[in-house]
Amino acid sequence: MTPKKEKPSLILASASPRRLELLARIGIVPDCVETAEVDETQKKRELPADLVLRLAELKARDVAGRNPGALVLGADTVVACGRRILPKAGDEAEARRFLELLSGRRHRVYGGVSVVDAKGKAHSRLVVTAVAFKRLEAQEIDAYVAGGEWRGKAGAYAIQGRAGAFVRKINGSYSNVVGLSLFETVSLLKGLGYQV
C-alpha cells in the first residue's frame, strides 16, 4: 500500500476575517494565519491590476520567507473607478466622497491571489469584477456612513453587508468583491497539490 501523501501546511497571509470566512465556507481551514508586513503604497502610474497582483505576491512572499516549505496564500483587493483607486477610507468624510463617486456608476474590483509554493515560487492570478451601483440618495449615504460598515473596506463599502442593496448589477466573481476569488484560489491550490 502506498503511504498517503501528507498535504503541505497552508498559511493565509492576511489579517482579513472575510478571507478566512470565505475559505471556511468551502471547507478550507488554513493551518495558521499570519499577517504580512509590506508597504502597500501605490507606485507612480501603477495601474490597479498591477498594484493588486504585486501586493498579493508581496504578502505571500513576506510570510513564506518566515515559513519555508509551506504553501502561503496572499491576496489583495483594489476598488477602482476608472484609473482612480479607492483605498480604505480614512474617515467619514472620505467614505462619503467614495460613495458619492460610485453612485450611479460602474466600477471595477480587482482581486489578486498569489500562492507561494514550498520551493518559493509564486503562482498568481488576477480577477476583475465589474460592479454597478444604483444612484444613491444623500440620506442613504449618510445612513451607511453613520453605520460604520465602511471601515476597513476598500472603496468604503461591503457588498456582503448593507451595501448589497446599492448594487444594481455585478459581472464576475462575487467572492472577489468580498475579498477573495474562491474559484481562482481553489484552482491555484489544487494545481500545487493541496487537497481541497
Image (spheres, helix red, strand yellow):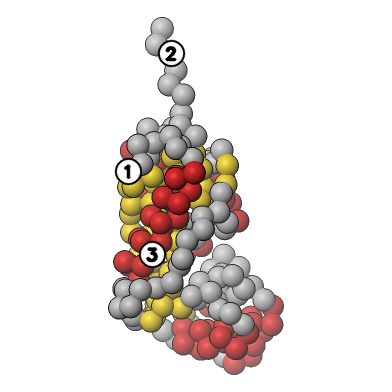
Give the residue drawn at x 47%, y 61%: 38
Q: For the residues labelled 2 and 1, say whether their Cβ atoms are less than 8 Å apart.
A: no
Q: Earlier in the sequence, mark 2 or mark 1?
A: 2
* Direction top: furthest residue: 1
Residue 34 appearing in the image: yes
Q: Nearer the viewer, mark 3 or mark 1?
A: 1
Q: Circle 3 sits in a helix, a strand or a loop, which is it?
A: helix
Q: For the residues labelled 3 and 2, say whether their Cβ atoms are less than 8 Å apart.
A: no
Disc 1 marks which residue? Answer: 121
Disc 3 marks which residue? Answer: 52
- Whole-number angstrom distance, CA of label 3 to CA of label 1: 18 Å
Residue 103 x/y as whole percent: 48, 86
Q: Circle 2 sits in a helix, a strand or a loop, which is it?
A: loop
Kind of residue at disc 1 = Lys
Kind of residue at disc 2 = Pro
* Direction front: furthest residue: 66
Dividing the image into 4 quarters, which one contains the C terminus?
top left
Q: Is residue 134 above or below residue 108?
A: below
Dividing the image into 4 quarters, which one contains the N terminus?
top left
* Direction right: furthest residue: 147
Disc 2 marks which residue? Answer: 3
The total of numbered circles placed on residues is 3
Residue 78 x/y as whole percent: 43, 69
Give the residue drawn at x 44%, y 37%: 68
Residue 49 x/y as whole percent: 32, 67
Mark 2, other Cα within 10 Å: few <14 / some 14–19 / many ≥20: few
Give the residue drawn at x 59%, y 92%: 138
